[in-house]
């Protein structure tokens, strides 16, 4: 309501669209508010006085009052707008500085004129340092051309451009950034670049990870060879994969199995046989979690077998199922080849002159032979089947005097996972006694059992020769056959080394090569068949593991019998002994060689090697030493070898009374070649074993 000339006038709000469309009265809404504010402001007495004025004067006075109020309102509005502008500007600067992206203004000369705090933080510098610095200084040297080209494009066409490049922080770390830039020019002012910087380091990493994931998933999808069909609740085909489509193109397959021709949009259930239909519906209705069926699908050219597995898609699509058809024809071929490979391995093992075996000692103390070649029939007079689950028949064959030593040696090997080597006797029901020599490598199984891969040979003839040698030693005590005794010792040692060398070579060359060929065949089978039938990959992996274990066992047995380092010369052989000793015991062992060109014939090299080997074995078992030194020197026509340790030492005289066969054997080895062996030791002062061997091939004992 507005009061004019003492009258009350009702003013209604006009339609805003009409106000905007009325050019002759653009300020009408403000006037309306001014008239409303004027209402009641003029006193009644003033109104009565003004009523005496002419009509035109009254109207002019009224207009002046309304105009004054309009001015006051405009001033108030202006002050309000200015206040809001100040507040908005403050908020703008807050938003500008605290924006999650960096803002920069770069002048024509490439200097940074403005920058927010985010940009300064991205570059690791204070904003005051950033301003008036060249923007290109913060760009990675490999990305300078990217920014240069982008800037030239913006200058040329004025369009907004974007690129990805690396900015270098003050600490030298790169920051992957997306840079958006546009050219801005105001009248009378030089043009500048407005730049927006977004840190996309995580996006780059995520992009790389996504790319890798896509590549990985694509690789998996491309490798799927099974035929896959997806059905809805009604049994209609929703989708099939490429393998299924190729399967559907096989006319022979469709003739034998109409399901193969089903494509999306068709009913899968209508062409199923009764057995398949019942299984699929059981999964659809939730009666079973999955259903598997193996069925034949023979074409005119070949016989093929498939496995069908039905699984639900989940609660989101209740009733929908995924059907995977996997061809299992390759499984039959693989099983046949596996049987052939095992038969070949069995034939090889049966050709080796000795027993090839795997022996398992369970945590409860029971034992078995998971594998034994047919030679076990001659070695222990039992069949492989009799001891496959229980080795008690073999244990019962052990000679009563050797059984405890056998059990203890196996227990020590199991505790330390050390190689097992032992000579022992077996006694049969007819009273026959045979000497056996066993070698094996131990490994721990997942269930805590210990498994040995080994080799056993019958050494009865050698032991009889040793007994004959012992008899001749008795004669030598009378001084009548010292030379014969040494000849027998040399012959025995040579026979033993020849036997070791022969067996090691037979194992390495025959069994090792065939096992390697067998593993290559397994790899070929894996490449040919496992891609077609992934479920069989585990079977092939188990076979490869068995062959790898056998190869490892063969190499270990061959090395124990005769290290290949002996073929490289005496120095190399002793260096190998030193490394093996340090690896097994953890003790430092140093080899001092005066002349690397020391050259001995094979007989002398083997004797020196065995003496050093026996000395190191004694150190490991008894010395409790912290360091071992081996000296190898050339003195005139003689070779001097010394093995020294700083261990507990022992009483040499007392040891001689005990007739230690280890020390006696070393001494006899040296004596046979016309050499001499000396042992110096005292309790608490370590031990030194010295041996001197002549180089002259014509010296005493050489002919033996």
Image: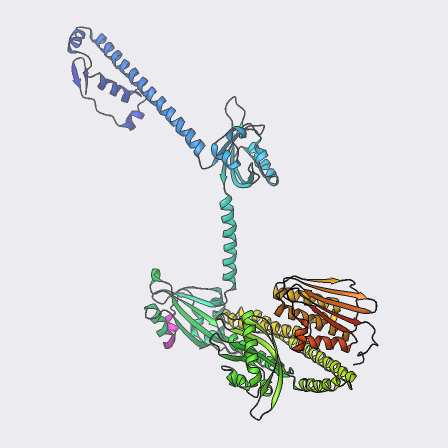
Name the quarter where the N terminus is drawn.
top left
Q: Is residue 268 magenta?
A: yes
Q: In this orientation, does residue 385 appear?
A: no
Span of residues in magenta: 265-276
Q: Is residue 307 above or below residue 208?
A: below
Pinpoint residue 170: horizontal percent, then vertical percent.
56, 36
Name the quarter where the C terminus is drawn.
bottom right
Q: Where is residue 381, by image quadrant?
A: bottom right
Q: Is residue 90 magenta?
A: no
The residue sitting at 71% across, 75% down in the picture is: 666
Q: Where is residue 398, by image quadrant?
A: bottom right
Pinpoint residue 287: horizontal percent, then vertical percent.
32, 70
Q: Is residue 190 above or below residue 143?
A: above
In the foreground, 377 or 245: 377
The residue sitting at 63% across, 62% down in the picture is: 626
In the foreground, 596 or 40: 596
Q: Where is residue 77, by image quadrant?
A: top left
Pinpoint residue 39: horizontal percent, then vertical percent.
20, 17
In the foreground, 567 or 82: 567
């Amino acid at each position: 309501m507005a009061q004019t000339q003492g009258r009350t006038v009702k003013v209604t709000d006009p339609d805003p669209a009409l106000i905007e469309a009325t050019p002759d009265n653009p300020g009408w809404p403000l006037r309306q508010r001014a008239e409303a504010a004027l209402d009641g402001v003029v006193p009644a007495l003033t109104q009565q006085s003004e009523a005496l004025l002419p009509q035109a004067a009254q109207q002019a006075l009224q207009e002046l009052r309304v105009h004054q109020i309009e001015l006051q309102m405009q001033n108030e509005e202006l002050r309000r707008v200015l206040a809001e502008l100040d507040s908005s500007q403050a908020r703008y600067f807050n938003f500008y500085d605290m924006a999650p992206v960096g803002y920069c203004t770069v002048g024509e000369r490439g200097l940074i004129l403005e920058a927010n705090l985010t940009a300064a933080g991205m570059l690791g510098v204070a904003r005051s340092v950033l301003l008036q610095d060249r923007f290109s200084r913060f760009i990675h040297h490999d990305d300078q051309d990217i920014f240069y080209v982008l800037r030239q494009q913006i200058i040329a066409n004025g369009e907004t451009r974007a690129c990805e490049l690396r900015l270098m922080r003050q600490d030298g770390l790169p920051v992957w950034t997306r840079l958006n830039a546009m050219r801005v020019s105001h009248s009378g002012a030089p043009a500048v670049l407005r730049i927006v910087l977004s840190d996309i380091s995580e996006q780059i990493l995520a992009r790389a990870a996504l790319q890798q994931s896509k590549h990985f998933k694509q690789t998996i999808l491309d490798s799927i060879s099974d035929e896959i069909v997806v059905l809805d609740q009604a049994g209609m085909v929703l989708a099939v994969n490429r393998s299924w489509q190729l399967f559907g193109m096989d006319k022979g397959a469709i003739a034998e199995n109409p399901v193969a021709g089903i494509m999306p949009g068709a009913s899968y259930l209508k062409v199923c046989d009764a057995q398949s239909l019942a299984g699929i519906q059981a999964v659809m209705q939730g009666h079973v979690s999955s259903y598997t069926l193996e069925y034949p699908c023979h074409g005119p050219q070949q016989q093929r077998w498939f496995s069908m597995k039905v699984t639900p898609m989940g609660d989101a699509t209740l009733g929908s199922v995924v059907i995977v058809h996997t061809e299992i024809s390759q499984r039959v071929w693989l099983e046949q080849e596996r049987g052939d490979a095992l038969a070949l391995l069995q034939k090889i093992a049966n050709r080796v002159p000795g027993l090839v075996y795997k022996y398992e000692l369970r945590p409860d103390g029971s034992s078995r032979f998971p594998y034994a070649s047919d030679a076990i029939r001659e070695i222990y007079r039992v069949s492989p089947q009799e001891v496959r689950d229980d080795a008690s028949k073999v244990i019962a064959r052990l000679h009563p005097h050797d059984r405890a030593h056998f059990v203890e040696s196996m227990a020590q090997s199991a505790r330390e996972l050390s190689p097992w080597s032992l000579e022992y006797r077996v006694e049969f029901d007819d009273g026959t006694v045979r000497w056996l020599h066993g070698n094996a490598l131990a490994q721990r199984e997942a269930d805590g059992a210990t498994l040995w891969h080994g080799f056993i040979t019958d050494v009865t003839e050698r032991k009889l020769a040793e007994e004959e040698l012992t008899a001749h030693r008795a004669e030598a005590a009378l001084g009548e056959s010292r030379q014969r005794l040494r000849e027998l010792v040399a012959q025995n040692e040579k026979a033993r080394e020849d036997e070791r060398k022969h067996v090691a070579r037979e194992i390495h060359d025959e069994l090792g090569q065939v096992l390697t060929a067998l593993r290559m065949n397994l790899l070929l089978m894996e490449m040919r068949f496992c891609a077609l039938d992934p479920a069989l990959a585990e079977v092939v992996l188990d076979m490869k593991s068995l062959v790898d274990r056998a190869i490892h066992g063969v190499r270990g047995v061959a090395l124990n019998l005769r290290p290949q380092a002996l073929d490289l010369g005496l120095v190399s052989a002793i260096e190998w002994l030193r490394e093996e000793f340090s690896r097994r015991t953890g003790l430092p062992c140093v080899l001092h060689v005066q002349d690397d060109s020391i050259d001995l014939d094979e007989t002398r090299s083997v004797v020196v090697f065995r003496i050093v080997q026996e000395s190191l074995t004694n150190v490991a078992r008894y010395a409790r030493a912290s360091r071992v030194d081996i000296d190898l020197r050339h003195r005139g026509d003689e070779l001097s070898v010394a093995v020294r340790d700083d261990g507990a030492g022992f009483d040499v005289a007392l040891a001689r009374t005990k007739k230690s066969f280890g020390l006696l054997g070393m001494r006899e080895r040296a004596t046979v070649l016309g050499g001499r062996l000396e042992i110096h030791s005292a309790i608490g002062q370590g031990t030194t074993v010295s041996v001197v061997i002549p180089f002259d091939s014509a010296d005493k004992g050489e002919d033996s």
